[in-house]
Image (cartoon, helix red, strand yellow):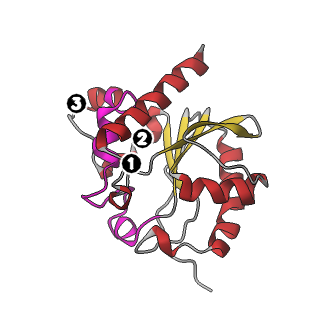
Amino acid sequence: MPERETLPDRLGSRLELILVGINPSLYAVARGHYFARPQNRFWPAFSASRLGQPICRALGVERLRPEHDLILPEFGIGLTDVVKIPSVSASSVTPEMYREGVPQLCATLRKCRPRVVAFHGMTGFRPFLRYGLGSPARPDWGLQPQTLEGIPLYVLPNPSGANAHFKPSELVAGYDRLAEFLVSLRG
């Protein structure tokens, strides 16, 4: 069976952070970039945050755009997904897709060994807990009590427009808290 086209991981060596989405959208795959849909709130919120501001300054831009996903690893930030099968919407991801995708994600994270792994939303994190860590825990936002072999796990609001009950300012605040946590790990 031929391999399905997907959005490649944006990873590198010595990553501080890997941001994990649920799965790539067909739109993002067609454009070749993460969070490519204009309505997605990731790039505006990330750019306005303490995580994104140093990157904006280094690049001399006011706001990062989807094509900047290619260079995020140079700044210590990687991107991947729980499930690499693209779909029109994350609601199309089945339990079977999570059962297959989570072990692959765990292998990727173990290989990269970032300082922190942050999931965009509970929808992708809950299956990670279940199929990756065998945990029935009911997660909350922010830093989690579980780790992946010592790698801290963190949950952020999902910036998708379909998750509009989180205001843009709350998305920025979530990235800011994650930035503070990363600083605390550096000592």
**Which residue is farthest top?**
187
On the image, numbered disc 3 is attached to which residue?
A: 60
Given the image, on which type of amino acid does mark 2 rest?
Leu
Viewer-nearest residue: 156 or 43: 156
Where, quadrant-wise, is the C terminus in this rendering? top right
On the image, numbered disc 2 is attached to which residue?
A: 72
Q: Identify the residue at image location x=67%, y=39%.
A: 113
**Which residue is farthest bottom?**
1
Is 6 placed left or right of 137 in the picture? left
* CA distance separating discs 2 and 3: 14 Å
Which portion, as a residue range, is magenta? 24-53
- Circle 3 Cα neighbour tier, 10 Å, few/some/many (<14 / 14–19 / ≥20): few
On the image, numbered disc 1 is attached to which residue?
A: 69
Q: Is residue 20 visible?
A: yes
- Circle 2 Cα neighbour tier, 10 Å, few/some/many (<14 / 14–19 / ≥20): some
On screen, residue 121 above or below 12: below
Judged from the image, the secondary structure of the residue bearing numbered disc 1 is helix
* CA distance separating discs 2 and 1: 5 Å
Check contact, mark 1 vs mark 3: CB within 8 A.
no
Viewer-nearest residue: 40 or 56: 40
Check contact, mark 2 vs mark 1: CB within 8 A.
yes
Given the image, on which type of amino acid does mark 1 rest?
Asp
On screen, residue 47 above or below 67: above
Q: Position of residue 96 (x, y in %)?
A: 67, 75
Judged from the image, the secondary structure of the residue bearing numbered disc 2 is helix
N-term mark: 1 or 3: 3
* CA distance separating discs 1 and 3: 16 Å
Q: Which mark is residue 107?
A: none
Q: Position of residue 93 (x, y in %)?
A: 54, 72
Q: Identify the residue at image location x=40%, y=74%.
A: 88
Where, quadrant-wise, is the N terminus in this rendering? bottom right
- Circle 1 Cα neighbour tier, 10 Å, few/some/many (<14 / 14–19 / ≥20): many
